Image (cartoon, rainbow, N blue to C red):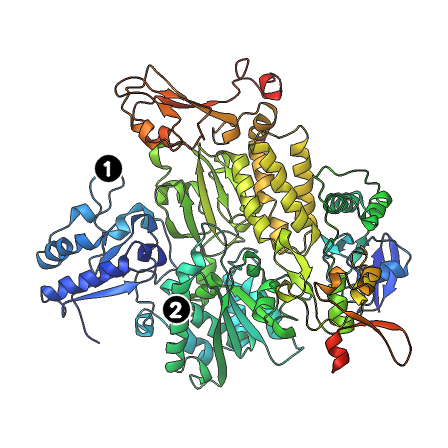
């Protein structure tokens, strides 16, 4: 293997790619060869680095220097200054805030410092399209150990000892699941499936793992196949993930080429092959029985359990299905032992969890942290807190069917049990951060309308119930809420949760129930006072222009799409609320705080507990 | 045989039986809409939910698809279960306010009105017709099309079916009588999905059938 003095690791995860990281990589190679450095410096395309907010990202090794937001035009400077002259390129380095000193090394940056990588251990480190890179980084070390030194039962025991629980959402103990499938004796033919049908808005854990380290998933599956007794496996990935599809398909091809898949793997007698199945993009196909129906070529609709897949799964055969992240943990558990893994995390939730941290948070990205870490640590220490000096309001954990956790629970340790107690779920690990400008009723409406679209329509409570929840929530945000709506929503939510056929319906009411539980007064303000305290719901706000503060700069006048603002330069403008569509464009551009968002129906008396001082005007 | 308790009563049942079958055997009434004795149950309407306690854990399960197991305790009519059923009927009443079968069900469960905005659907997607066409007739002429609230029963691609034999089974089994046999025989049913069937008589028994012309000519 050829040696280079420096490796430039260019993030080619989906986020950075959409910001032209492939072009950056190409320019780097051009510039490097222009300076005759091609034998000294190697440019490596890697999977998602995680710090998506700052992409495209280039990390220089072995120094561990982190360069952010690198564009094509930065490349000549980077090559000349850093590679040729050995000088730091400060303008491409991370600063926690403007004016703060630059932090050159990746692992000194708070975003990375608090993370612990197991499932993502190779992210941003290896070329995901090279099996040799994976092998060089402790890849396919677990497989010969498993096949050569361990019996299937011993592997299952080791996974049980590790305490690993399903990372797809439900948190079922993985070792137990494998055991059920191994013991199922209804057929000799068994299947294993990797569930990569990640469909929540704002979630990219599975995609990033498949893009950054596809062989880790594959190695986990081969070990699983040996432990369970399966000869065939399937990786189900949604078709909207072209890069993930490409990399897992390549990984399978390369593994076959090395004899790590196919017949008699490593002379162990194990035969195992893997096929990639492209999902059509239905959220409900993440549900295991719907996913299996989809692989069989039928409509992606869940069926009642029991029978569970371990007894009757794909084509009626015993089937073991695990999430991408679950599979990615397996090889490390085999190498280091279940006990090592179980030392990380909390009493009932072991190991680490990958979260996609998005929304109103400074450091958007993908993070892997030990279970039991507090939300505060994730959002403030790793996430860098809320941008623009705004206040934290809530975080939606577990995707659209998760729950909103309010500020008073910010010190909640994140594990399966604690999140469930708070009314949310771990889900697959989406964390959507919301600031004080977020209307919680509107948020509930948004998530519920997503779920209404994605409900398969098979069972009555989910199909009809979610739709009615969305209708009532829409009424409330549009100022047509009525007394009793909250109670109807609560009852309906509980019925949908309790009576639905599958996990989609069983979790769909979570955003409604948690926002009512923690932000009931916002619902009441919308219904009784026709007031949106966050000033979001258009039916309840009015934009006003203060003639005293207005300098007549005409910025607002120029951006207004409906011509609602009039006036001449250097004279206070006028805002015609008849023409105003409340888009907020004027508010965004005004530098003099002359535009204000006010309640459409101002309260008659000074603020008091909602309901005691009724807003007569609003109820006309 | 399996021993279990239903509403406090000790019963024995076949190991393969579902809770619904055992309950009906015992004369315990559990309402259903998507269940049909001749078809595979799918647990879709969720009206038959019951509370099941096993190993200290209580779950709500659809009786039509829940297999019995040893020592299981089933409660079919708790306040919680009644509330679930009433709410589901309210949802169905809003979807199909004119349907006799839903109105009767509402009466039975004491549901007087619904808090949800009324619509005018005449099908509540129980899927009995779809299963009958598959499992009894064996032609799969119809299936579920679209997802969620846009779900409906149609032939593939909503085009006239070229496998439908006009047997009328779907119209016979439809609990909503949405598929009207009278209308089928006049060749104007939605069952034909735009396909015209010429009525002809069977030369052996003399009964009239709805047979696609193409079948007769072959």
Q: Pick the quarter of the image with the N terminus of chain A.
A: bottom left
Q: SS at mark 1?
A: loop
Q: Chain of mark 2?
A: A
Nearer to me, A447 or B208 = B208
**Residue at position x 36%, y 61% from top?**
A121
In the image, residue A318 above or below residue B151: below
- The residue beneath circle 1 is A98
Residue A571, quarter of the rendered image:
top left
Figure disc tally:
2
Instruction: Give the x, y percent position of residue A249.
Output: 41, 72
For the residues labelled 2 and 1, say whether their Cβ atoms are less than 8 Å apart. no
Left or right of residue A209: residue B10: right
**Residue at position x 53%, y 59% from top?**
A165
Q: Which mark is residue A213?
A: none
In the image, residue A378 above or below residue A352: above
- The residue beneath circle 2 is A246
Q: SS at mark 2?
A: helix
Nearer to me, B126 or A102 = B126
Residue A520, quarter of the rendered image:
top right
């Amino acid at each position: 293997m050829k040696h280079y003095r420096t490796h430039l690791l260019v993030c080619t995860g989906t986020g950075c790619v959409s910001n032209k990281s492939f072009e950056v990589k190409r320019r780097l190679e051009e510039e490097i060869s222009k300076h005759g450095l091609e034998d000294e410096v190697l440019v490596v395309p890697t999977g998602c680095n995680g710090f998506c907010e700052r992409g495209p990202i280039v990390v220089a090794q072995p120094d561990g220097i982190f360069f952010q937001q690198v564009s094509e035009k930065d490349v000549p400077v980077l090559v000349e200054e850093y590679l040729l002259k050995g000088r730091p390129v400060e303008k491409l380095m991370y600063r926690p805030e403007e004016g703060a000193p630059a932090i050159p090394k990746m692992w000194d940056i708070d975003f990375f410092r608090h993370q612990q990588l197991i499932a993502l251990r190779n992210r941003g480190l290896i070329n995901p399209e090279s099996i040799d890179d994976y092998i060089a980084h402790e890849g396919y070390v677990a497989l010969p150990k498993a096949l050569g030194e361990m019996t299937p039962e011993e592997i299952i025991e080791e996974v049980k000892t590790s305490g690993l629980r399903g990372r797809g959402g439900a948190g079922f103990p993985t070792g137990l699941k494998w055991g059920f499938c191994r013991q199922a004796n209804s057929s000799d033919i068994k299947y294993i499936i990797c569930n990569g049908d990640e469909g929540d808005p704002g979630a990219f854990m599975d995609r990033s793992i498949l893009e950054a380290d596809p062989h880790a998933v594959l190695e986990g599956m081969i070990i699983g196949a040996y432990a369970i007794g399966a000869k065939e496996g399937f990786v189900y990935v949604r078709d909207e993930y072209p890069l993930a599809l490409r990399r897992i398909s390549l990984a399978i091809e390369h593994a076959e080429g090395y004899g790590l898949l196919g017949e008699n793997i490593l002379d162990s007698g194990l035969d195992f092959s893997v096929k990639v199945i492209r999902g059509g993009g239905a959220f409900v196909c993440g549900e295991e029985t719907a996913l299996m129906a989809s692989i069989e070529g039928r409509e992606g609709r869940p069926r009642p359990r029991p029978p569970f897949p371990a007894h009757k799964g794909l084509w009626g055969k015993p089937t073991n299905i695990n999430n991408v992240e679950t599979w990615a943990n397996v090889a490390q558990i085999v190498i280091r032992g279940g006990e090592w893994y179980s030392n990380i995390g909390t009493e009932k939730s072991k190991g680490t969890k990958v979260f996609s941290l998005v929304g109103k948070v400074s450091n958007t990205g993908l993070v892997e942290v030990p279970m039991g870490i507090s939300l505060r640590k994730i959002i403030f220490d790793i996430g860098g807190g809320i941008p623009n000096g705004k206040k934290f309001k809530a975080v939606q954990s577990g995707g659209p069917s998760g729950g909103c956790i309010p500020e008073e629970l910010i010190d909640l340790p994140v594990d399966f049990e604690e999140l469930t107690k708070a009314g949310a779920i771990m889900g697959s690990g989406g964390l959507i951060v919301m600031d004080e400008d977020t209307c919680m009723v509107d948020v509930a409406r948004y998530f519920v309308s997503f779920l209404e679209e994605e409900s398969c329509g098979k069972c009555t409570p989910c199909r009809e119930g979610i739709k009615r929840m969305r209708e009532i929530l829409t009424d409330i945000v549009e100022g047509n809420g009525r007394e009793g709506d909250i109670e109807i929503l609560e009852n309906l939510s509980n019925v949908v949760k309790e009576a639905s056929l599958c996990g989609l319906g069983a979790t769909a009411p979570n955003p409604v129930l948690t926002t009512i539980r923690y932000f009931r007064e916002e619902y009441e303000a919308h219904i009784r006072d026709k007031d949106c305290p966050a000033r979001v719901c258009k039916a309840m706000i009015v934009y006003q222009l203060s003639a005293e503060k207005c300098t007549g700069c005409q910025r607002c006048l120029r951006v207004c799409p409906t011509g609602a603002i009039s006036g001449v330069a250097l004279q206070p403008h006028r805002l015609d609320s008849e023409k105003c569509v409340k888009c907020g464009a004027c508010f965004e551009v005004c530098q003099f705080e002359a535009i204000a968002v006010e309640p459409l129906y101002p309260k008659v008396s000074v603020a008091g507990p909602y309901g005691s001082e009724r807003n007569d005007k609003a109820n006309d | 045989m399996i021993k279990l308790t239903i509403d406090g009563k000790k019963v024995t049942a076949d190991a393969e039986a579902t809770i619904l079958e055992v309950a009906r055997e015992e004369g315990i009434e559990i309402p259903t809409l998507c269940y049909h004795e001749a078809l595979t149950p799918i647990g879709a309407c969720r009206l038959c939910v019951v509370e099941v306690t096993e190993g200290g854990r209580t779950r709500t399960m659809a009786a039509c698809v829940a297999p019995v197991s040893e020592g299981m305790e089933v409660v079919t009519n708790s306040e919680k279960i009644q509330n679930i059923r009433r709410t589901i009927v309210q949802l169905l009443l809003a979807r199909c306010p004119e349907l006799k079968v839903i109105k009767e069900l509402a009466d039975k469960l004491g549901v007087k009105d619904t808090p949800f905005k009324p619509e005018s659907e005449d099908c509540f997607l129980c899927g009995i017709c779809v299963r009958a066409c598959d499992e009894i007739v064996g032609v799969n002429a119809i299936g579920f099309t679209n997802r969620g609230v846009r779900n409906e029963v149609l032939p593939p691609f909503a085009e006239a079916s070229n496998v439908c034999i006009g047997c009328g089974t779907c119209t016979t089994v439809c609990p909503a009588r949405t598929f009207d046999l009278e209308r089928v025989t006049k060749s104007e049913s939605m069952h034909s999905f735009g396909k015209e069937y010429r009525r002809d008589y069977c030369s052996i028994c003399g009964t009239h059938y709805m047979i696609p012309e193409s079948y007769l000519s072959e």
